[in-house]
Image (cartoon, rainbow, N blue to C red):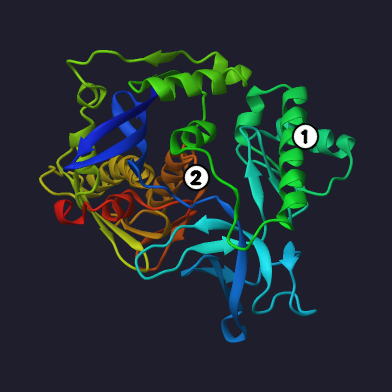
Amino acid sequence: MSISKIIITKMDFLSSDVLLCGLIENDRLTEVHLEQLHRTTVLGNIYVGRVQRVLENINAAFVEISPGFSCYLPLENVKDPICVKRRSSRRISAQDELLVQVQKEAVKSKAATVSTNLSLTGRYVVLTTENKTVGISSRLDRKSREHYKELMEDRGCTDYGVIIRTNAKHAADDEILSEIGELENQLRNMMAHAENRTCFSCLYRTAPGYRTFLKNVYIDSLREIVTDIPPVYEELSAYCKCYKDLEKIPLRLYEDADYPLASLYNLNKQLERAVKKTVYLKSGGFLVIEPTEAMTVIDVNTGKSISGKDPQEHFRKTNLEAAKEIAHQIRLRNLSGIIIIDFIDLTSKADQQELLDFLKKQVRSDSVPVQVHDITRLNLVEVTRKKVEKSLREMLDSAGFAAHCG
């Protein structure tokens, strides 16, 4: 098992000041969240929005959450929206004011996406307002899943849906139930005050990026949390004391002013490599990673690696090495949506299945759901990964780094 730690630091990257939250595994950057200092995000925030127009032909609506800031609302998942002001008896119509939560930030020409299914995320559970079922993380074993299902049934029906997160396995039942109660109270208070708030009011603001990062990370191999920012250290000290599993993880304030934390872990160089399209493998092979508007394409090449007497065996080993690195790069670069991988062609069905199984194993450690589908007739492997926030490249582009990252 890899030994991991979380690093939270301010750093200068390509002439811009950023706050970096990174997961380091065996001294290698594995996950990263970047925020440009003094720049706020709307992701996860809940607003009193106003419906601009409803487009029946695409089954969607556009909702303003602030003057001139229009967001896309798909209507297929709208079940029971919380309306503050309703203009007609229809489910949603123009000029309605309703509560919406930002699920995806605006990217290039695409508007931000909002949902009427409001959710509050804790460390162990997620509460939802429209999807009122009980969901349990697929990463938990069968025994744990059955236990949590019984726990929710014994608790009785509620006005909200509950999703049991993977981190719940580190918590006692009373901690989980206590967090559910806290989130329920937070939702009830927010909705009780919504009718008295003006349009475009922000009713809920997501926690700082480093808090969200820590909330979502799996702690199975986490050995330390390190920051060189005193206010962040103080805030996280108080936050971690609220959770028995986090309280066991050492939190350290790094105070060596002569050798910055970013330099200690060579973060600038690791970030620069993380946006280059070519990734070299130890064997001499390499990957070419090409993000496009519709999907990300990854090509595996043998490069300077030596095949030996059995080319197919060499291709098999290179593909397995590439699969491990691809899982790492998908997570590091925060790639999402459709990902097509062009591995080196394997003639053996057994070798193809071994490659698929190995890739599935490698992506299990990702905190974001990843699905490895199948090999197409053209020997391409199809992968999909849930979109939760901008890719690393998009984070850099939005912070003004595009000119430096070619």
In the displayed structure image, the side of residue 94 where residue 373 appears, left or right: left
In the picture, the quarter occupied by the C terminus is bottom left
**Amino acid beneath label 1:** Gly
Which of the two residues, 125 or 188, is positioned nearer the viewer here? 188
Q: Is residue 267 above or below residue 47?
A: above
Whole-percent x and y of residue 192? 77, 50
**Amino acid beneath label 2:** Val
* Callout 1: SS: helix
Identified at 17% across, 15% down, the residue is 258
Which residue matches tag 2? 368
Q: Residue furthest bottom?
A: 57
First in sequence: mark 2 vs mark 1: 1
| Mark sitting on residue 221 | none
Which of the two residues, 353 or 339, is positioned nearer the viewer here? 339
Q: Residue furthest left?
A: 304
Q: Is residue 50 above or below residue 402?
A: below
Whole-percent x and y of residue 68? 46, 70
Separation of marks 2 and 1 at Cα, in angstroms: 26 Å
- Please report contact status of discs 2 and 1: CB closer than 8 Å, yes or no: no
Residue 151 seen in the figure: yes
In the picture, the quarter occupied by the N terminus is top left
Identified at 55% across, 19% down, the residue is 238
Identified at 47% across, 63% down, the residue is 112
| Mark sitting on residue 181 | 1
Count neighbours of disc 2 (C-alpha within 10 A) and say few if under 14, some if 14 to 19, many if 20 or more: some
Whole-percent x and y of residue 208? 47, 37
